[in-house]
Amino acid sequence: MQLKWSDVTPKPLWLNRRQLIAGAATLLASPALARIEAAPSKYSSTEEPNSLEDISTYNNFYEFGTGKEDPAAYAGKLTVDPWSVVIDGMVDKPGSYDLADLVKDQPLEERIYRFRCVEAWAMVVPWIGFELAGLLNRVGVQPGAKFVAFETLLRPEEMPGQSSPFIEWPYREGLRLDEAMHPLTILATGLYGEAMPNQNGAPIRLVVPWKYGFKSIKSIVRISLVEKMPQTTWNMLQPNEYGFYSNVNPHVDHPRWSQASERRIGAGLFGGRQDTLMFNGYEAEVASMYAGQDLAKDY
């Protein structure tokens, strides 16, 4: 059943919110006609963001192909309006929610985050989004929920990469509940003041800046609160290379890529490499969540 927040929110409170929501709903309906207003964030990096061209033309989104340019080349045909997300599992208010209902009442911020791929390249991206914790609090996380599982859209007629048997589709990811509730973890709906480009995970994607980029699942259609650690696509495919946590760690190499340093996209021919920072530079904010864990084993 398709639900709206009015179905799960007391009517007087819902009515008071409607005017505030109207602007956000208009943006979602007509992303090309208006800019998204987002407040600056205390969590933003002071580094210079990459250009929109860098961000939108060099990325991994295997649903459209394995080449870095494939998402930009083929994602234009993806239909992102209408869009809904199923929220289920151990929540008080399960249902299928319209995207506008998910976004409304959530304070949008511009989060300028470092973005680190496991392939040892990096960017700085000015995402626009809201904290995942805000949404989870609204649907009510039940006692016993320990993890959050995510799924990407499965639509091979618009996502040609899904015709490949290389991956068991749909793409799946997951977080431990404390990771999901951390204020750095966001659901992003735009970048550079505009709606999210299709090739970057429109219309809504996860961003977890202290983890390798493949954890930041794109084009989300399901969010499930579960008790047991969920299966994740790359761990299912190559468990010796990809763990569940996938935190950026310069001391634990991937079998095919050293993680000690990284190449900054857009730095030019003589840009060189830079040292990889523990937790991608967010160690002060997130390290306490992993106290007592062996990060070489829980990779």
Image (cartoon, rainbow, N blue to C red):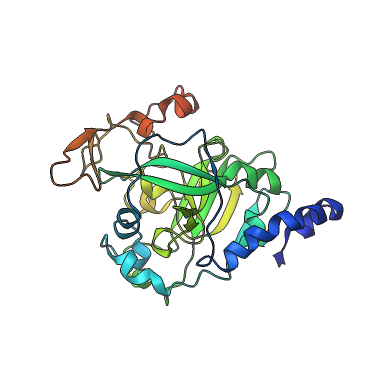
- Residue ID at (32%, 47%): 50
Q: Residue at the top extreme?
A: 292
In depth, the one of 210 and 188 nearer the eye is 188
Can residue 227 be seen at all in this image of the molecule? no
- Residue ID at (76%, 58%): 18
Where's residue 272, x and y in %? 16, 38
Q: Residue at the left extreme?
A: 270
Is residue 123 shown above or below 56?
A: above
Is residue 165 shown above or below 218?
A: below
Q: Quick check: 174 left or right of 298?
A: right
Q: Quick check: 91 left or right of 76?
A: right
Q: Residue at the right extreme?
A: 12
- Residue ID at (56%, 51%): 37
Where's residue 5, x and y in %? 74, 57
- Residue ID at (36%, 51%): 234
Where's residue 194, x and y in %? 48, 58
Q: Quarter-wise, where is residue 278 in the image? A: top left
Which corner quadrant holds the N terminus? bottom right
Where's residue 185, x and y in %? 51, 41
Q: Quarter-wise, where is residue 160 in the image? A: bottom left
What is the total number of numbered labels drawn onto the structure image?
Answer: 0
Which corner quadrant holds the C terminus? top left
Q: Residue at the front extreme?
A: 34
Can residue 238 be seen at all in this image of the molecule? yes
